[in-house]
Image (cartoon, helix red, strand yellow):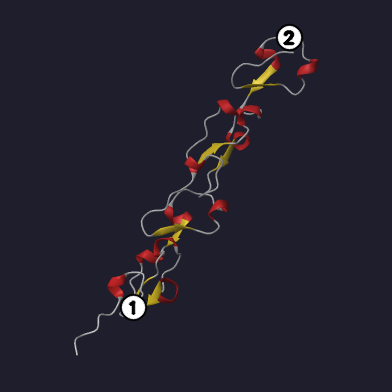
Amino acid sequence: DHTCGTNKVLKSSSSSIPGSADAACCDDACSSYSCGAGYHLKEAAASITGSDAATCCDQNNCSGNANTSNDHTCGTNKVLKSSSSSIPGSADAACCDDACSSYSCGAGYHLKEAAASITGSDAATCCDQNNCSGNANTSNDHTCGTN
């Protein structure tokens, strides 16, 4: 049996092909193909015969890519959409929603403790009412006056 060189795979009909050279016995593997921006090689690229984007590449999704370096990181005051692993893209506009940390609560209210990781842009979702005491941020606790 012939062993193909780097970035090569045996032709599917190799058992009936005479010869012992890569040129006769092997085809290009996807691992030798360079995907364009926003795409990455399929997970088993070294064992897939091909030399084009349709065969060799998958589009990057916002998250959940086999190579996590292809996952998108949202900007300030943004959180990944809950369905980000099935959304193609690598930009905040496609991948991210506003986080509560960008919302300004009205008087007598404060942002929820984990505001930077909560998707929302309204008081009901993002804010808690200040209590007299026991607030997560003690600066929201009331200090009684004298007398």
Select label 2 or label 1 by which is in front: 1
Q: Residue at x 59, y 32 (%)?
A: 52
What x and y, as percent, mark residue 40? 53, 37
Along the viewing direction, whichever of 75 and 22 lies nearer the viewer:
75
Q: Is residue 60 above or below residue 44?
A: below
Secondary element at image label 2: loop
Q: Residue furthest left?
A: 146
Disc 2 marks a residue whose amino acid type is Gly
Q: Is residue 75 above or below residue 107?
A: above
Do labels 2 and 1 touch, CB within 8 Å? Answer: no
Q: Residue furthest bottom?
A: 147
Q: CA distance from mark 2 to mark 1?
A: 84 Å
What x and y, as percent, mark residue 81? 50, 58
Along the viewing direction, whichever of 133 and 114 lies nearer the viewer:
133
Where is residue 13, by image quadrant? top right
Q: Is residue 24 above or below residue 144?
A: above
Q: Residue at x 55, y 44 (%)?
A: 65
- How many marks can you see? 2
Q: Residue at x 40, y 69 (%)?
A: 112
What x and y, as percent, mark residue 142? 28, 80
Where, quadrant-wise, is the N terminus in this rendering?
top right
Secondary element at image label 1: loop
Q: Is residue 38 above or below residue 111?
A: above
Q: Which residue is mark 1?
A: 133
Q: Which residue is mark 2?
A: 19
